[in-house]
Structure formats: C-alpha cells, structure tokens
Image (cartoon, grey):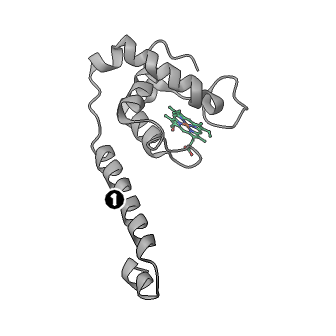
Amino acid sequence: MTPTQFCAAAVCGSIIVITSSGIGGALAQNAEDETLPEFTEEFLADAQNITAGAEIWQAQCRHCHGNSAYPGKAPKLKPRRYKPEFVYIRVTNGFGKMPAWKAVYNRDQRMDVVAYILSSEFSP
Ligand code: HEC
C-alpha cells in the first residue's frame, strides 16, 4: 500500500510525517554505505585502525566468532581467504544469521574492524 492509499483512509498525517522522515534517514544512511571504501595497504597496516578494530571485535564479534564462543554459533573466520571488501560488506549488511552493523558502527569503525581481522594481530 502506498502512503497515499494508506492516508486516504483517515487521520494519518502525523504518521506519514514520521514515516517519511524515517525513510529519508534510512536512505541517507544507505547512500553513504553504497560506495565501497578503498582499503589501501597503508590503511590496513595502521596500528591505530587495528587497535580500534580490535576493541569492536572484543565488544561484539567475539561472542559469536571467538575461540571461546559456543561451537556452531558462527563460523571461524579465515582472514587469509578474505578480501577486505568482502569482510566490510558482511559486517555492513550482515548475511544469514550474521547481524548487520551499519546502524551500530559508522563507516570508519567498520573499516577498522576489517583492518583488525586482516592484520597479524588478529586473535579470535
Ligand atoms: C550473533 C552472532 C554474530 C555476531 C555478533 C557476529 N557475527 Fe559474523 N557471522 C555470524 C554467522 C552466523 C555467520 C555466517 C553467516 C552465513 O554465512 O550464513 C557470520 C559470518 C561472518 C563473516 C563471513 C565469514 C565467511 O567466511 O563467510 C564475517 C567476515 C563476519 N561474520 C564478521 C563479523 C564481525 C567483524 C563481527 C563483529 C562486528 C561479527 N561477525 C559479529 C554470526 C555473528
């Protein structure tokens, strides 16, 4: 049902306002996410990015992907097989039972966790 059809029924002016601003916000968020970031060697090797990514890993990802996570909760990651873009897309949009993180972490933070996973510091 389109907003117009929905609204033809009755007193939904205020609902429409809320809904359309919600959609606008979601689109703005997506527009930011649609362009894949460029992962330079320099970015991936940067100690600050890796450290920031490690904190996100500890706070969230470890519960499912960590060595001490309940077996079968999530696959063990295989960083050597991944391109940074693949990890970024999975983290951003989720996949299957893997949650999406775009509403939780901004673009820089999601890039940082990619740098951490692909780094020699990675210790799940
Ligand atoms: C609620 C549990 C859960 C959490 C929390 C979680 N994941 Fe996942 N993740 C999964 C599951 C389940 C899959 C497998 C999805 C599939 O392929 O069906 C997955 C898949 C992935 C993959 C793709 C693995 C592959 O080889 O295909 C990556 C990369 C990944 N997760 C990274 C992360 C990162 C980074 C975080 C933290 C920001 C995170 N995950 C948090 C459950 C989780």
Residue 64 found in image quarter: top right
- Residue 116 lies, in percent from the top left, at 45, 20
Report if the beta carbon of the residue with label 1 is closer than 8 angstroms to ligand 1: no
Q: Note whether 31 is above or below 121 in the view shown.
A: below
- Residue 53 lies, in percent from the top left, at 46, 22
Q: Note whether 69 is above or below 44 in the view shown.
A: below
Q: 111 or 121, which is in the foreground?
A: 111
Residue 83 in view in this figure: no
Q: Residue extending furthest right?
A: 70
Looking at the rendering, in which quadrant would you find the N terminus? Answer: bottom left
Looking at the image, residue 72 sits to the left or right of residue 34; the answer is right
User: Residue at horizontal 58%, vertical 26%?
Assistant: 59
Looking at the image, residue 104 sits to the left or right of residue 21; the answer is right
Residue 54 in view in this figure: yes
Instruction: Indicate the secondary structure of the residue bearing disc 1.
Output: helix
Residue carrying label 1 = 24
Q: 38 or 4, which is in the foreground?
A: 4
- Residue 26 lies, in percent from the top left, at 38, 54
User: Residue at horizontal 43%, vertical 34%?
Assistant: 87
- Residue 24 lies, in percent from the top left, at 33, 59
Q: 66 or 18, which is in the foreground?
A: 18
Looking at the image, residue 72 sits to the left or right of residue 27; the answer is right
